[in-house]
Amino acid sequence: MGNVNDGKLNHYYQMRYLQILFTIMLLIIAGCGKRNEKRLEIVQSERGCIVDVSDKIMSIKTDYVIGKVFLYIIDDILLTEEFYPKGEKVDHLFDLNTFRYITSTGVLGRGPGEITMPSGILVDREKRVFWQLDVGKKVLHKFSLDSVLSDEMYLPGASVKLVDTLLLVWYGFLNDSIALGKAIEPFSGSPFVTMAMTKFNINTGEITRFGYENPGVKGRYTNSYFDMSVKDEIYVNSYPFKDLMTICDLDGNLKCNVYGPGWDDPEKDDNSYFFDAVIHNNRIFASYLGSSRIIVQGNIQRGAYPRSIIVFGLDGSYKKTIDTGAEICSFCIDEKHNRIIAYFNDREEPLGYFDIPVE
């Protein structure tokens, strides 16, 4: 009998041990779930690490940039695209090392290979090509860098037709045939311009909705800037009308929402927040305003531009704020020289650059 009782007692302790072990495992899993949930929602009420570079900006003097431009880098070339073209060509190329003017391309017009409404460029550094969006014709034009450099009369021979329902504006190539990016919804029914995250097949022209969209962003607030990094396996949306940046993996799954101090403040509805975002060297660089989107100068009102660039980790963590002291219309990152090149709205020489501050 003693042996039987001992066996029952041992079995009882074994079952209690398993129950306790199972409970501990459930608590661990629940704890991990809570940590993941917190990681998905990052609230940054203060961003106080300010680095002033206003006295370190070096001017780039040129007669070939006469209006606001978007900035891109391909190989050893600084490529600029004019916001509002004033000449016969919209794109101007400069030597990245000396900023010497080289040539211009992107002929304005309605003929084959010509551009009616330039609206952004995607650079493919490995293939030495860049794609230019023409929202007037609803096409992507493919430019060969080598052809542009060797032929002043060059016109792109290849173009991809876009569909009317979703018009791609900010995008990056996932591979040779698939692009991810933000698209305008011209027939959304909203009185404001709305945008959606999309996947685009460059071979078939098919474009579909894709990936995570923050449920707190509707209507005109869906407008965002976009960048992606295949190497880092993420893409970023930075929102001008909401104090929000979202980071997702390349399958469209949310990694984190980053909320700033103006996210849920109704008194700040007239503010602008994020503009350009660039992923570089395990960091996200995003230009940021955080105040009224309108500047009043006497009887004149105009749109405001950010004066700062906020630096984040790829996990959304705040690193520092770079204060330029001038309005940044656009910027790009020169990896070769570890510097930021920007077009400033209120400097005598609008093109300039500065070294990226060391952390």
Image (cartoon, rainbow, N blue to C red):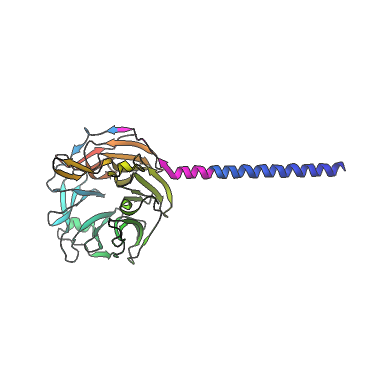
Stretch of the chain drawn in magenta:
32-50
Residue under the point 31% across and 41% down = 267
Residue 219 lies in quadrant: bottom left
Residue 24 lies in quadrant: top right
Residue under the point 77% across and 42% down = 10
Residue 43 part of the magenta-drawn span: yes
Residue 203 placed where, x, y %? 33, 65
Residue 148 placed where, x, y %? 19, 57
Residue 271 placed where, x, y %? 28, 43
Out of 138 and 157, give the one closest to the viewer.
138
Out of 151 and 248, give the one closest to the viewer.
248
Q: Is residue 154 left or right of residue 13?
A: left
Q: Is residue 347 left or right of residue 38?
A: left
Mark yes or no: residue 337 visible: no
Out of 204 and 208, give the one closest to the viewer.
208
Residue under the point 25% across and 34% down = 53
Mark yes or no: residue 190 visible: yes
Residue 178 placed where, x, y %? 36, 60
Which residue occupies the extreme front position in the image?
A: 267
Residue 321 lies in quadrant: top left
Residue 102 part of the magenta-drawn span: no
Q: Quadrant of the C terminus?
A: top left
Residue under the point 17% across and 53% down = 84
Q: Quadrant of the N terminus?
A: top right
